[in-house]
Amino acid sequence: MRLVLASSSPRRAAILRAAGYDFEIRPSGTDEWPYPGGDPGEYTRSLAEAKAAEAGDGVGEVVVGADTVVVIDGSVLGKPGDPDEAAAMLRRLSGRTHEVVTGVAVRDGTGLRSGHARTRLTLRALEEGEIRLYVATGEPLDKAGAYAYQGAAARFVTRVEGDADTVIGLPMALLRELLPPELRR
């Protein structure tokens, strides 16, 4: 049975590869819709389901979709639209604890299974100069919440409560639960 990752995220691919999986990358063409309110976990789960459905029919293959958001004060932060928005997000997260929520969906010949995982993460207080320097690297521009835990922003993190893979974008414990038994490792 062929495993398909419905994402162009090199971070998700690295997590899956490190777990020993051989897979095909087939990015979904799903447009991410704006957060409508409610439970961020259900929002990410719905997006993950749409991505898994878009990337393949599940016949003879297992398709994995995922989506990640950052939640602070009841607001959902996705990917910033530009450097100014990235800097504003980092200012908002500076010195605070927030939640990272990743939805995962698995589609195969037996149907669609999905769920979400949550991890709490704390950033130290950031100085304006280091925010500007970090944003100038370009790294925050395609990351939920405008930071890469596994990248240069690792130096900003003071505490992680939960699974780091959830923050990076593919919680392996949840994925293993959703995969068919023959693919669980």
Image (spheres, rainbow, N blue to C red):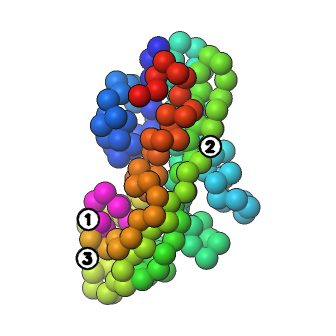
User: Which of the two labelled residues, at mark 1 and mark 3, occupies the earlier sequence position?
Assistant: 3
Residue 115's label in the rendered image is: 2
Q: Position of residue 66 (x, y in %)?
A: 52, 43
Q: What residue is shown with label 3?
A: 133
Kindly tell me whether residue 185 is visible in this rendering.
Answer: yes
Q: Amino acid at mark 1?
A: Ala
Where is residue 113? Give x, y as percent: 64, 32
The 10 Å Cα crowd at callout 2, few under 14, some 14 to 19, many 20 or more, is many
Residue drawn at x 59%, y 48% is: 116
What's the residue at 39%, 75% (across, down)? 123
User: Residue 101, labelled with which disc?
Assistant: none
Q: Residue at x 43, y 73 (%)?
A: 122
* Residue at image mark 1: 152
Say whether disc 1 or disc 2 marks the residue closer to the N-terminus: 2
How far apart, in angstroms, are the residues tagged by discs 1 and 2?
29 Å
Relative to residue 94, is residue 36 depicted above or below? Answer: above
For the stretch drawn in magenta, what is the main secondary structure? Answer: loop
